Image (tube, coloured by chain):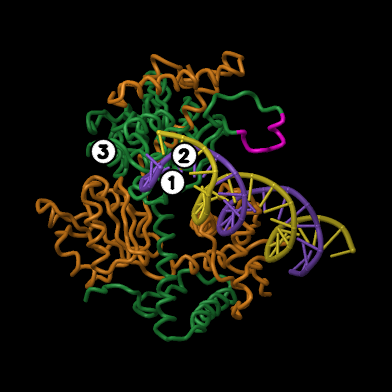
Chain colours: A orange, B green, C purple, D yellow
Amino acid sequence: MATPGRATPADAVAPSRAPGRRQGIPDATVARLPIYLRALHALNESGVATISSDALADAAGVNSAKVRKDLSHLGSYGTRGVGYDVEYLVYQISRELGLTQHWRVAIVGIGNLGHALANYGGFASRGFEVVALLDADKASVGEDVNGTPVTHIDQLPRLVAELRVNIGVIATPAKAAQEVCDRLVEAGVTSILNFAPTVLSVPADVQLRKVDLSTELQILAFHEQRKALAADREARGDARSSAAALEALDALGDEARSLGSQRAEAGHVTNDAATPLPQAVST
Amino acid sequence: MATPGRATPADAVAPSRAPGRRQGIPDATVARLPIYLRALHALNESGVATISSDALADAAGVNSAKVRKDLSHLGSYGTRGVGYDVEYLVYQISRELGLTQHWRVAIVGIGNLGHALANYGGFASRGFEVVALLDADKASVGEDVNGTPVTHIDQLPRLVAELRVNIGVIATPAKAAQEVCDRLVEAGVTSILNFAPTVLSVPADVQLRKVDLSTELQILAFHEQRKALAADREARGDARSSAAALEALDALGDEARSLGSQRAEAGHVTNDAATPLPQAVST
DNA sequence: TAGATTGTTAATCGATTAACAATC
DNA sequence: TAGATTGTTAATCGATTAACAATC
């Protein structure tokens, strides 16, 4: 049955809606659907016909309430007391994600990363096909990568039109990324995946997502440092020394400020000199 | 001055805390700090000495309230009426992220992606150094990639200990990823960045992040499909036809269900056959 | 001083989670 | 029927945002 919808003021004029279907799937849910789908594909190949939210949650690394809540946004596709039909769920999630359509991908920037992406098998797996490789370097034009020739970036508008490219992947250096992005948009590409370590801007009707290696590393470093500080505090058996350590670092910062134009790197500390990290536990 | 801290029940016994420093930086903030840092580095190199939250927000692609809120979690590093000192902010964010330390990275799986990662310059840029490359394939052992030799995976415990590896990067096929992950953890690595398209499990004290290419593509496809459906509705000038299109897709789904064991792929539709996508606008 | 901009508050929004009635 | 498991509710939590007093 149709859920009554959240009671927002705007709901006063809510239009009639298809039964069992809500108007929008939350972003957080959309981001998890590919994970569920991957797990379900594996289960399907193992011959599993039915799965409970609890088991799927296990496979996806989340909790079962989240699985049920997420899947409920697609419709009522489970059976109480039984679980979800694996194949049916694969189909419904695939459809919701648009994977029952065929998406044509162009990769721009055929350096190390571009090569890796062009050769990446998982790319082509479900609904995606790399149809064009482009680069600004005339030396690499004509090279064949995994069956697709590298074409000069100036051919972008023609290729996008002829090959009906839906998705552009940017694997250029950061410097070139915004211009390449603009040219993709100009050529009519409305979804872009950016691997270049820079912020891009696109019109509101263009989807932009990014994969940012160095950001991920820095987030890891943040947590690693926190663990090291906590371990340090633990070792001293002193609840205050964590604060003390932070204070010491603060003092370093203040010193840097007072020096004004001192280069940030000057304050660097290696693990050797300072707090030993909790590593090489096996020794 | 020290903020009073959020009034949680546990706050009744709140210990005295370093002035100007809160106890925890929200995850969402931590994830944005590297973006701010990148923008600040660029500004610094352009000789900009001071920046407002508004200008930094522009450079980072967020709004200024978010910038101020995020930076306030680090301390009061701005000057009212003036803005933030670029160099000082670079230093403070670097320190908070742990980039004033030196992190040693091991990459496991030296296929296309592993090669690209090993050659990726941005890696080494700020505080990270690739110190080891490992692979299970004896044929690739001994190969030199960007100055680092490829070593056999069986040497992992020794290398992690000797080179004091902090961060492990998994670039193996999905099948091998969990075992590699276990071996990294066993060897004492406490931060892992996973590029393999599979869910990994680690002990609670190990940091795990992932970079998932195919998930990103699928999220793009979802939004692209939504745009195509919206455009379709628009073209018909009929507010209902969107719901009608979804109903038609639902019917397809029901059909698939009634067929029971039908393969999910059987329901695939290409863009050619169905709704034309809003592409090749330039023609 | 007048103008500019931070740091903080409080309102709002969206996501997560536990719990359980519905129901297979 | 008894047991299992979904789908939904409602409480809670965390993130976002606008607004503005503080203050340079």
Give the residue pinned by disc 3. Answer: B48
Rendered location of residue A270, percent (x, y): 37, 19
Q: In the figure, is residue A187 to the left or right of B200?
A: left
- The answer to which of marks 3 and 2 sits earlier in the sequence is 2
Rate crowding at label 1 as few (under 14), some (14 to 19) or many (20 or more) other CA atoms within 10 Å.
some
Please say whether residue A205 is visible from this viewpoint. yes
**Residue B143 figure quarter:** top left
Q: In the figure, is residue A205 to the left or right of D7?
A: left
Residue range corresponding to the magenta coloring: B4-12
Q: In the figure, is residue A43 to the left or right of B91?
A: right
**Residue B132 figure quarter:** top left
* Same chain check for tags 1 and 3: yes
Q: Secondary structure at mark 3?
A: loop
Rate crowding at label 2 as few (under 14), some (14 to 19) or many (20 or more) other CA atoms within 10 Å.
many
Rendered location of residue A23, percent (x, y): 56, 71
Q: CA distance from mark 1 to mark 3?
A: 45 Å
Q: CA distance from mark 1 to mark 2?
A: 28 Å
Give the residue pinned by disc 1. Answer: B174
- The answer to which of marks 1 and 2 sits earlier in the sequence is 2
Q: In the figure, is residue A78 to the left or right of A39?
A: right
Q: Secondary structure at mark 1?
A: helix
Q: Residue at left 36%, top 24%?
A: A257
**Residue B175 figure quarter:** top left
Rendered location of residue A102, percent (x, y): 37, 69
Dot 2 falls on which chain?
B
Amino acid under disc 2:
Val
